[in-house]
Amino acid sequence: MNFLQNHIESIIFCATDPVKPDEIRQCMSEMFEAEIPLDDILNAVDGLLSKYDDEIYPFQILQIGGGYQFMTKPAYQSSLGIFLKQKSKKRLSTSALETMAIVAYKQPITKAQIEQIRGVNCDYAMQKLLEKELVEIQGKSDGVGRPILYGTSQKFLEYFGINNIKDLPSPKDFSSEVNEIGEVNDPEYNALASQAIAEITSEETIESISDEIPEEEPGDDLPEDTSTENEQTENE
């Protein structure tokens, strides 16, 4: 088992993207010229997960995007953050992050629907997200003009270190005392705040907002917020 485990470890180590169990099985079957059961692959991977869970290792194997990949542990986030900040010259702008968040939580969604939510033209932000392969085309809508539908990509899952789009935090997870207004210990305020949060995060409210967003029609573009987008262009 250790022999098989060592081969699997080397595959995951050299892979630039998460390696799926079936990909590992096919590789091992071809190398050994024999059919390797998937259970043996999974058992070997479980052994690797336990091995690198030890604190002597600064990295670990995580299940991301349906596969396995070596990742550094959170304890070393500060030093890596400084290193990557020095190496990185181009980062996503605020406009691109806002657009990506809308796509992630509302997908599949058209560009007109994104602009309806943001209130500004999002051509440039969508272009950058498509170039970075964080967003992808997922087909066309059945609405008037058959507008293109956008959604998050496999690279999006890998970039944010999640295994499934369902792992994204819900709106309730963003509640923070730092963002509260008024006296926190005021019973009347707390009651009103709780009621407002419940209404905003209710399924009925979310569905009603989605229903109010019109389908994109040919040539129907919102006015471009040139000041905002131009400022973001300089940061890219």
Image (tube, helix red, strand yellow):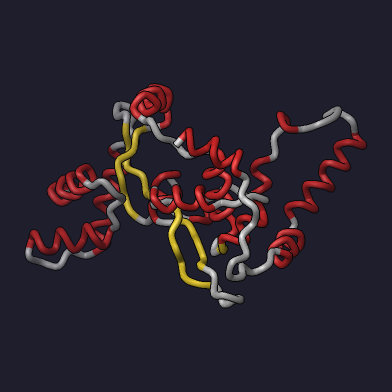
Q: Residue furthest right?
A: 188
The spot of residue 190 in percent (x, y) is: 85, 37
Q: Nearer the viewer, residue 199 or 124?
A: 124
Residue 76 appears in view: no
Question: Residue 160, percent across and down?
Answer: 45, 44
Left or right position of 26 against 154: left
Residue placed at 38% from the left, 32% from the top?
Answer: 73
Residue in front for this viewpoint, 94 or 218: 218
Residue in front for this viewpoint, 5 or 219: 219
Q: Please state which of residues 80 and 45 is positioned toward the viewer in this rendering.
A: 80
- Is 56 above or below relative to 153? above
Q: Residue at x 88, y 41 (%)?
A: 191
Residue at the spot x=88%, y=42% of the render? 192
Where is residue 120? Give x, y as percent. Answer: 64, 50
Q: Which quadrant of the structure image shows residue 9?
A: top left
Question: Residue 67 in the image: x percent, y percent?
Answer: 33, 54
Residue at 61% x, 50% y: name it.
224
Vertical comparison of 169 with 212: above or below: above
